[in-house]
Image (cartoon, helix red, strand yellow):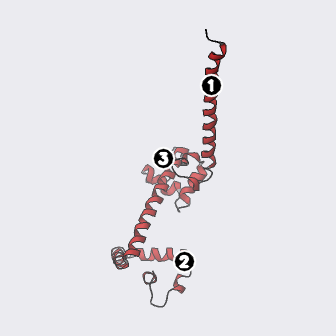
């Protein structure tokens, strides 16, 4: 005949192990929460856009110079007019989808920029030829790029020697 202690002890150990597991899960959850305090912490594994409120989600796109309602939603929902969705207002899930789109767009831009940097460093002559071809096909791009450069580097014209172009300075 088994004693009461031999029956209760295994059950007690099971309950104790269960509570240890729960407290370990709480500790893991709290680490995830503390590691996900701002949109800068987003890593798409432990810290996702779903963890943030609408203003924070909007800031992800705004930091890239995109307005969620005017630039991203029309693309996501294939709308002609911004803010038109059959009279419905946008919900948090829409802003989460927009944040994912902006993150994806930023990753694409970073990848393209790294390719451009590699080409310009590895083969500057090919890079110049590519730029010349782009300028030939789309001459308006020069004005747009110059405006952006002047915004980013206000003293660029002063830094270049007379007759020197931006490409020559690279």
Spot the residue most to the top. 1
Q: Is residue 121 left or right of residue 147?
A: left
Q: Is residue 71 left or right of residue 13?
A: left
Q: In the image, residue 136 lies at what x, y percent?
A: 33, 77
Q: Which mark is residue 138?
A: none
Which residue is rendered at x = 46% and y = 83% of the image? 169
Instruction: Using a 10 Å C-alpha cutoff, classify the residue at mark 3 as few (fewer than 14 neighbours), some (14 to 19) or many (20 or more).
Output: some
* Mark with earlier residue (2, 3): 3
Nearest-to-viewer mark from 1 and 3:
1
Q: What quarter of the picture does the C terminus occupy?
A: bottom left
Label 2 element class: loop
Q: Which residue is mark 1?
A: 13
Which residue is rendered at x = 34% and y = 75% of the image? 130
Q: In the image, residue 140 lies at what x, y percent?
A: 40, 75
Q: Is residue 10 above or below residue 157?
A: above
Q: Give me the C-alpha separation between circle 1 and circle 2.
A: 67 Å
Q: Is residue 80 above or below residue 166?
A: above
* Mark with earlier residue (1, 2): 1
Spot the residue most to the right. 5
Q: What quarter of the picture does the N terminus occupy?
A: top right
Label 3 element class: loop
Nearest-to-viewer mark from 1 and 2:
1
Q: Is residue 15 above or below residue 40?
A: above
Q: Is residue 44 left or right of residue 128?
A: right
Q: Which residue is mark 3?
A: 85
Q: Which residue is mark 2?
A: 153
Instruction: Using a 10 Å C-alpha cutoff, classify the residue at mark 2 as few (fewer than 14 neighbours), some (14 to 19) or many (20 or more).
Output: few
């Amino acid at each position: 005949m088994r004693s009461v202690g031999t029956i209760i002890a295994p059950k007690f150990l099971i309950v104790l192990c269960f509570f240890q597991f729960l407290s370990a899960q709480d500790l893991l959850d709290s680490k995830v929460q503390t590691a996900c305090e701002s949109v800068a912490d987003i890593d798409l594994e432990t810290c996702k856009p779903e963890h943030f409120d609408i203003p924070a989600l909007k800031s992800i796109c705004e930091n890239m110079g995109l307005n969620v309602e005017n630039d991203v939603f029309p693309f996501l929902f294939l709308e002609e007019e911004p803010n038109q969705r059959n009279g419905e207002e946008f919900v948090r899930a829409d802003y989460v989808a927009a944040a994912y789109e902006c993150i994806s767009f930023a990753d694409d831009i970073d990848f393209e920029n790294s390719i451009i940097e590699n080409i310009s460093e590895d083969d500057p002559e090919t890079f110049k030829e590519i730029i010349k071809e782009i300028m030939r096909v789309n001459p308006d791009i020069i004005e747009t790029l110059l405006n952006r450069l002047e915004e980013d580097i206000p003293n660029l014209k002063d830094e270049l020697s007379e007759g020197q172009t931006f490409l020559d300075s690279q």
